[in-house]
Image (cartoon, helix red, strand yellow):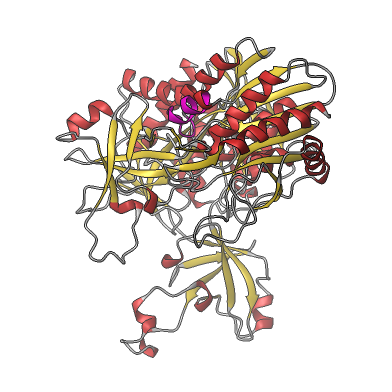
Amino acid sequence: MKELLKKLTEVYGPSGNEGPVLHILQKELKGHVDSMKIDVLGNLIVTKGRGKPRVMLAAHADEIGVAVTHIDKNGFLRFTNVGGLRPVNMLGHRVRFQNGTLGTIGEEKRDSLKDELKLEKMYIDIGARDKAEAAKRVAVGDMGCFVQPFVDTGSRLIAKAFDDRVGCAIVVEALKRMRKPACSIFAVFTAQEEVGVRGARTAAYGIKPDVAVAVDITGTGDTPESRTMAVGLGKGPAIKVMDGGMLASPQVKEALIAAAKRLRIPYQLEVLIGGTTDAWGIQVTLEGIPSGVISIPTRYAHTPSEMVDARDVENCVRLLVEYVRSL
Amino acid sequence: MQLLRQLSETHGVAGNEKAVRDLIWSEIKTRVDSKEVDAMGNLIVTKKGRKSRPRIMLAAHMDEVGLMVVNIDKQGMLKFRAVGGLDERALLSKHVLVGKDKTPGVIGAKPVHLIWRREEEMKRPPKTDELHIDIGASSKEDAEKQVKIGDYAMFDTEYASLGPTIKGKAFDDRIGCALLVELLKKPLPVTVHAAFTVQEEVGLRGARIAAFRIEPDIAIVLEGTAAGDFPEKRDLSKAAMIGKGPVITIMDRTVICDRKLVDLAIACAKKARIPFQLKRPGVGGTDAGRIHMTKAGSRTLVISVACRYVHSPASIASKADIRNAGRLVSAVLKAL
């Protein structure tokens, strides 16, 4: 599974540009699912099993990134954010565009280091000598993502885009382990979550599931002077109670807790202040769809170096498989 | 441009689009095959084309930003709030028309003679709650004979032709409405479901239910977008400029447009030698933000005309841009 995590986190895939991620997922799932299709918004929808209930699993394929807004006469690129990026996490980092063009992020001179770092005062330098040279490699509207190698420290893993490629890997692994599911599984690798949970809504509308579980990351409160949050790395899957967008449907939450207890794996209850997941959009689609979330505790979310615990990841897979088995 | 004059001078603040809807309907009623006005007031018409697939929705919003009376004080002054993202710096001393009877008034504030020059008040534009609409009433009772709380107020702006450009209010999005009306008057290569939507300026509300009804495969939104062609010393990201052609959106705050449609629009523009510009990514939002997420989703494109000073009492737009936007939309429809 680490091999898959490496592939999925190192690949390019900002919101609206999920193609390369879906390509890896399709290759990985071949032979393990009954059907695969990509819908108009770019969601990859795979099915497995027959019968009731119809269960939707959602993990988003996109990641945060940047979009080029301007190429200046010296070939520097001005950019805007795609999803929730903080300027402080970007300086000195490298970005890659879909065609492989690489660049580094710089900033205009600040009069004082106390001055706020602003996106408008930053730029991407792709090493072009002037506008004409830059325009051969990138165009306004092109999106870039961070560049970082996947690192395995043993029990813990560091990579960009664990949000939410770790969720994608968990759903892939769970699909492989569920050999003959007794219900209809619709696993969706959703598009455009980071820009406002867009793909999950249209996918849910098309699928009309009876119940849904999103698999996505959540924050932690276990780093020095961090925000107060009763979720930590290595303490098991986090089962969502609420976040900035939703209250998890009680029946799904309770069923996830029961599944964790049957497996005798550690689990944590998650209350996230701010932020939300695909489940927020799915829950209020059509006449309402009972929805819950399995969250992977993740440090440094929305930075180029996010960290998860490998045992948490494995336990998330087991929890998802057991939950679906119990439906 | 005669139609655009009428559309611009018609009042239709979000939630009060009837006059605009009636005008549009009178223009197109003999040219379309079916009509419906839905529960929120969207005007949805279908005009058959040579082929019926893909299912295409074209959308332009009828509403504009404006004001609403929220209180009448003892002296008969009307306190008001903005409806939609109005440029509140631009309010002082503007002529407005209030309510159904179009009672004339002036937006007033404490006069300059009564403010010490160095006071903070002189250094910034007055805020909405420091302003009032003065309809010349002598008392609350007197004012209530002409207006009431909840009445809309609208800028009394005359449309004019200024050489290669036009001046008027509500170009956002009456230009889109005018483009759509003109399109519906011509034979079409493909059947079009046209939605003249309500309440875009207060949160893309009408488009959501219009798209739910139409259920398009492809949606094209016609808009007036902010122009940023002012003298800039620095070589930074810019908004579109007037006179440089229709504006194609790649990504704004509400949508990432379908890349294949964007590329198709660019190819159509190049082939027909229509000048075009790309909208600065990441700013603004349109009905496309709701339409593309409705039901199981649709592929969406936004084509706009750049307008200076949008969301203020008077905007300026280029006649050539409007013509070219119409040509571009027609070319895209033909290529679908």
Q: Say if B123 sits above or below B279 in the image.
A: below
Tell me where residue B203 appears, x and y as whole percent. 59, 50
Where's residue B225, x and y in %? 42, 44
Residue for point 67% across, 41% down: A237
Residue displayed at 32% across by 52% down: A120
Report the number of discs. Answer: 0
Image side of residue A161 versus residue A278, left or right: left
Residue A12 colored in magenta in the image: yes
Q: Quadrant of residue A12?
A: top left
Residue drawn at (50%, 18%) of the image:
A23
Which portion, as a residue range, is magenta? A4-16
Q: Is residue B178 left or right of residue A74?
A: right
- State the residue lying farthest toward the left: A129
Q: Does residue B38 appear anywhere in the picture? A: no
**Residue B241 x %, y %:** 31, 43
Say whether residue A149 is visible. yes
Q: Is residue A231 magenta?
A: no
- How far across and how far down the image is residue A67, in percent? 38, 38
Identify which residue, B94 or A209, lies in the foreground.
Answer: A209
Left or right position of B126 against B205: left
Q: Nearer the viewer, residue A56 or B33?
A: A56
User: In the rendered view, would you say B231 is above or below A174?
Assistant: below
Q: Residue furthest top?
A: A31
Is A307 left or right of B323, judged from the image as shown? right
The N terminus of chain B: image quadrant: top left
Q: Quadrant of residue B213?
A: top right
